[in-house]
Image (spheres, helix red, strand yellow):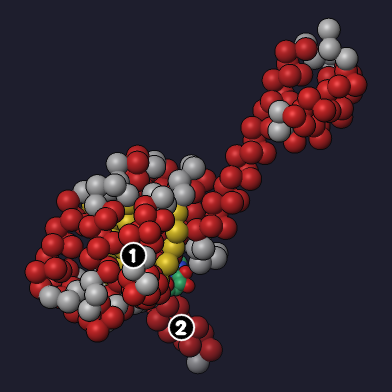
């Protein structure tokens, strides 16, 4: 039989920091409450597993760079009839669509909650173990163009391909001039059927020729995006504007 004095070293060797921290304290509790040895061990393992899960979610949340404070709990579904709560909840609670490399495209005018919904869905998916990265499309396009200038575009795309869910916020803000090198198209083609995208856009597909160097490329990009995609159209007026109108009414 092993000596109990060796337990801290063994736990350290096995890289089980939570068990190392808790075994002593939990042993007293187990004795007091007359747990069976197996129950003591199972409880200790459960603590380790839970702590690992929490740490992973924290790491992935940090890595995702999501805007803060945008959860499903703070989204008022009553004011946006064009958004079905059940659909948003389904996208948030089941990571299957990300595993299948499907996309989600959220259309709507400015201020209607596109970024809020994209963030809230992603936050939930991260807690299900999905790795994600949120970025403004403009910032990412600039980064990819810089990578291309340095002949490092394939590396940059490969790095992004390690992240199963990429959120491209405000695709419509990309200007044609920024797109001369068509890195956005290359990104979309690279992720097609391999990885997921959530895209927010304030122009309908019909106006996407302003985002890509030419019409053909816009059509080819849209084809790939919608092949496996959920599309949400928010048709209400700006929530932001409605809120400020309301507060003006109250003040006035
Ligand atoms: P968009 O990305 O469509 O321009 P945002 O998601 O940035 O809009 O929303 C603008 C602001 O209004 C944000 O602070 C967001 O949290 C808030 N907001 C928008 N729609 C709702 C909603 N239905 N319930 C609660 N807050 C909302
Ligand atoms: Mg937005």
Q: Which residue is mark 2?
A: 244
Q: Is residue 236 visible?
A: no
Q: How many marks?
A: 2
Dividing the image into four quarters, tell me where ligand 1 lies: bottom left
Q: Is residue 44 left or right of residue 150?
A: right
Disc 1 under 8 Å from ligand 2? The reply is no
- Snapshot quadrant of residue 6: top right
**Element at badge 1?**
helix
User: Residue 153, which numbered label?
Assistant: 1
Determine the CA span between mark 1 and mark 2.
43 Å
Q: Residue placed at 24% from the left, 47% from the top?
A: 193
Q: Residue placed at 38% from the left, 59% from the top?
A: 155
- Snapshot quadrant of residue 190: bottom left
Q: Position of residue 238 (x, y in %)?
A: 35, 76
Q: Is residue 6 left or right of residue 130?
A: right
Q: Is residue 109 left or right of residue 164?
A: left
Q: Position of residue 195 (x, y in %)?
A: 32, 49
- Snapshot quadrant of residue 217: bottom left
10 or 126, nearer to the observer: 10
Residue found farthest to the top: 1
Q: Position of residue 64 (x, y in %)?
A: 50, 58
Q: Residue placed at 13% from the left, 62% from the top?
A: 220
Residue found farthest to the front: 151
Q: Residue placed at 14% from the left, 58% from the top?
A: 223
Q: Position of residue 1 (x, y in %)?
A: 83, 7
Q: Dot 2: within a 10 Å radius of its alpha carbon, few (fewer than 14), some, or many (20 or more) residues?
A: few
Disc 2 under 8 Å from ligand 1? The reply is no
Contact, mark 1 vs mark 2 (Cβ under 8 Å): no
């Amino acid at each position: 039989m092993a000596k109990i004095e060796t337990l801290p070293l063994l736990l350290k060797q096995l890289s089980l920091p939570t068990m190392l921290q808790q075994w002593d304290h939990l042993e007293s509790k187990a004795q007091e409450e007359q747990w069976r040895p197996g129950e003591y061990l199972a409880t200790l393992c459960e603590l380790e597993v839970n702590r690992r899960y929490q740490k992973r979610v924290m790491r992935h949340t940090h890595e995702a760079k999501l805007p803060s404070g945008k959860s499903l709990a703070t989204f008022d579904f009553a004011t946006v009839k064009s958004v079905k709560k059940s659909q948003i909840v389904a996208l948030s609670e089941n990571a299957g669509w990300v595993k299948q490399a499907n996309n989600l495209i959220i259309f709507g005018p400015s201020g209607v909650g596109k970024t809020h919904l994209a963030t809230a869905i992603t936050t939930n998916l991260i807690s299900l173990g999905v790795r994600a990265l949120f970025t403004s499309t403009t910032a990412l396009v600039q980064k990819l163009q810089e990578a291309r200038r340095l002949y490092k575009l394939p590396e940059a795309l490969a790095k992004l391909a390690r992240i199963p869910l990429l959120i491209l916020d405000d695709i419509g803000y990309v200007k044609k001039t920024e797109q001369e090198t068509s890195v956005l198209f290359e990104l979309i083609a690279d992720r097609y059927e391999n990885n997921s995208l959530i895209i927010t856009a304030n122009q309908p597909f019909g106006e996407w020729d302003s985002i890509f160097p030419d019409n053909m490329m816009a059509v080819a990009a849209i084809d790939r995006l919608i092949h496996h995609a959920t599309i949400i159209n928010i048709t209400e007026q700006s929530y932001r504007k409605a809120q400020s109108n309301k507060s003006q009414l109250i003040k006035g």
